[in-house]
Amino acid sequence: MLLTLVAPAHAELASTAPKGLSVALSDNVLVLNDTDRSASLELVNLGSLPTEFALQSVKLVMNAKTQDGSEFIRWAPQRAKVPANQTMPMRISARQLDKLPPGEYMLKLNVSALTRPGPEAKTADKAQGVAVTIPIMPVLPVTVYLRHGIDTPGIRAQKLVYTPKDREYLGYFPVTKTVLGQSFVGQIQVINQATGDVLSSGRLHLRPTTNESVVRMPRGKFTAGAAGTYCLKIWDHFPAKGNPIQEQCNG
């Protein structure tokens, strides 16, 4: 999954300047805890010019208040210049978790992606007879959950609910968190119970303030319709690790 941000070039750039900048991150939600204290993601430069990625700010959300959280996270390297049409791995690590009471903490990161147009990309000031280049710098958000001294939050799936009047979705599996006030980040699969084929797969992310959600089943992927037998599998990690913590079938 790519979190992609496409930013048009400044309206005043000359026609020879790049028409757009396209940068991405391979993920925008990470979970760190006392066991898995680091995670990696890919910096993706889809544009035609080198782009420098850097961690711009880190905010810790705690008790409904926001404060600087840079002491709890390490982004290595601090800056990375990614050539055009290439990717580069980056690692985010938790640190000094012992300074925090047991619980889950949310960090809001802003990753800047600075691209400097070439010398031909200039705006002209006819009155002064000068020209300047204008750098383009979108910002990509990343959410990092820090879990310290707590178990991995769980989730409970309920029976499949059919929606015969919905033209887009066959139905949905309701899901409810078992621990309120904490996030849930895991992987889900809906399989054909008879064949074991995976019909849909993805990440299930419930924010700390969201206690319930649904896993929808697009009709285009579930061609057997209501006559089919389906199972929802849920892992409490993304990507999935080990066995699913929940399995709910309609057959």
Image (cartoon, rainbow, N blue to C red):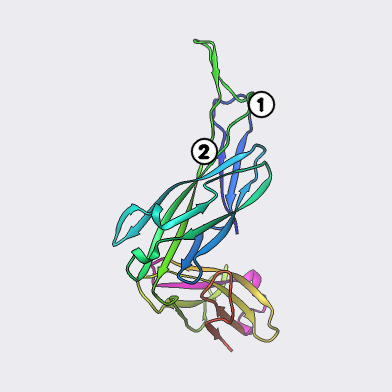
Residue 224 lies in the magenta stretch: yes
- Nearest the viewer among 58 and 10 is 58
Circle 1: residue type: Thr
Circle 2: residue type: Met
Q: Mark 2 points at which residue?
A: 137
The residue at the far bottom in this view is: 251
Q: Name the element at disc 1.
A: loop
Q: Mark 1 points at which residue?
A: 16
Quarter where residue 244 is shown: bottom right
Count of marks, rendered view: 2
**Marks 1 and 2: CB-CB under 8 Å?**
no
Quadrant in which the N terminus is drawn: bottom right
- Nearest the viewer among 68 and 233 is 68
- Tell me if I can see residue 237 in this picture: yes
Q: Is residue 86 left or right of residue 30?
A: right
At x 59%, y 89%, the residue is 251
Q: In this view, does 228 lie to the left or right of 38?
A: right
- Tell me if I can see residue 209 in this picture: no
Q: How far apart are marks 1 and 2 (CA)?
A: 19 Å
Q: In this view, does 119 lie above or below 180?
A: above
- Nearest the viewer among 218 and 84 is 84
Residue 148 screen position, x and y as percent: 40, 70
Residue 79 screen position, x and y as percent: 54, 44
Which of pointers 1 and 2 lies earlier in the amino acid sequence? 1
Q: Name the element at disc 2.
A: loop
